[in-house]
Image (tube, rainbow, N blue to C red):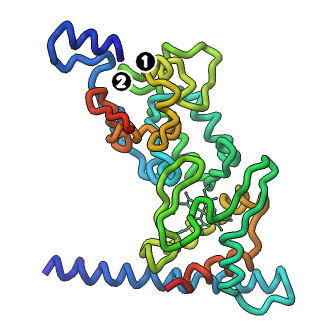
Amino acid sequence: MKRTLFVIAMFGAAPVWADGNENLASAVANPHWKTECSACHIAYPPSLLPERSWRKLMSGLVKHFGQDASLDGPTAQEITAFLVNNSADRAPNKRAKKVMGSLGPNEVPLRITETAWFVRKHDEISASVWQRPKVGSPANCAACHAGAERGDYAEHRVRIPH
Amino acid sequence: MTRFIILIAGFLAYGAAQAVAQELPQGYLAQARQENSQFREFSASRGENFYHAKRTHSNGKPVSCAACHTDNPRSAGRNEKTGKEILPMAPVANKARLADPAKVEKWFKRNCQDVLERACTAQEKGDFLTYLLSIK
């Protein structure tokens, strides 16, 4: 964020963003991924975790961060395939490469918020901001990124609620 | 004309969803009788108690159906874990409710496990649905 602001200061208000202005939506979305994941939270972009993370997460849905999120076999398989095919290892966007670069070779994060990439991108957000009632936790992307549901995380559209 | 057809199709789909919801408790009847020979019929008031009943989870936290679905099934709830809005549970307030038996079973499996730490009985499911359908 600080670096981005610096770059803007250097080049005027030109839309030059550290990670590019790209949308994080996968080229082809999977309808089951969308409905099943977004029943409880936004359907997080597959490109923000590596394949190994998605495989581990999808094999543990019976206790998904303390809750039963189990799916029938065929649906789980279809969603796993979609997540893997669009994971950080395979997605063509620059952000996916940065996510991969921020992870150690044996690291298998189950939360996007645990990746060094996420932590660095949000290092200017203080603990009290995450705890604001309208934010709640770092998992609530849409609190500040209004277009999160569509994969839109563009930095200039971020609005932090009070 | 197209608009007219869409309107008709809409009414038919709406009617079908309502019919599915009304029939849902029936689907649990045979199993409820099998599980308990004393069982007579589903009860909206037992379902209401079940909806609001609080228990302490083995992780020490208080849990209930109402914690996410709110005390009033006519109002929108909030997932107490993720903060995401949940639309009202009562079909009278949310026409899309209880329209797909597979979806209903999927959530009974998950939510009963999370709240009761066991599967719900057929009677509990039938009572719960009868309560939701009784709300006017």
What chain does badge 2 belong to? A
Residue drawn at x 27%, y 18% is A17
Residue B74 vertical placement versus A142 (above, below): below
Q: Position of residue B117 (x, y in %)?
A: 78, 57
User: For the residues marked 1 and 2, what is the alpha-carbon distance in whole angstroms?
Assistant: 7 Å
In terms of depth relative to the viewer, which is nearer, B92 or A133?
A: A133
Whether residue A82 is visible to the viewer of this picture, yes or no, is: no
Give the labeled residue for mark 1.
Answer: A97
Tell me the residue at 34%/42% (across/down): A150
Q: Residue B127, how many percent across, how many down?
A: 68, 81
**Image vertical order of residue A95 relative to residue B81, above or below:** above
Q: Which mark is residue A93?
A: 2
- Point 59% across, 30% down: residue: A53
User: Mark 2 belongs to which amino acid?
Assistant: Asn
User: What chain does mark 1 sit on?
Assistant: A
Residue B85 appears left or right of A28 = right
Residue furthest out toward the top? A10
Q: Secondary structure at mark 2?
A: loop
Q: Position of residue A52 (x, y in %)?
A: 60, 28
Residue farthest bottom in this picture: B40
Residue at far right of view: B37
- Quadrant of residue B72 within the rendered picture: bottom right
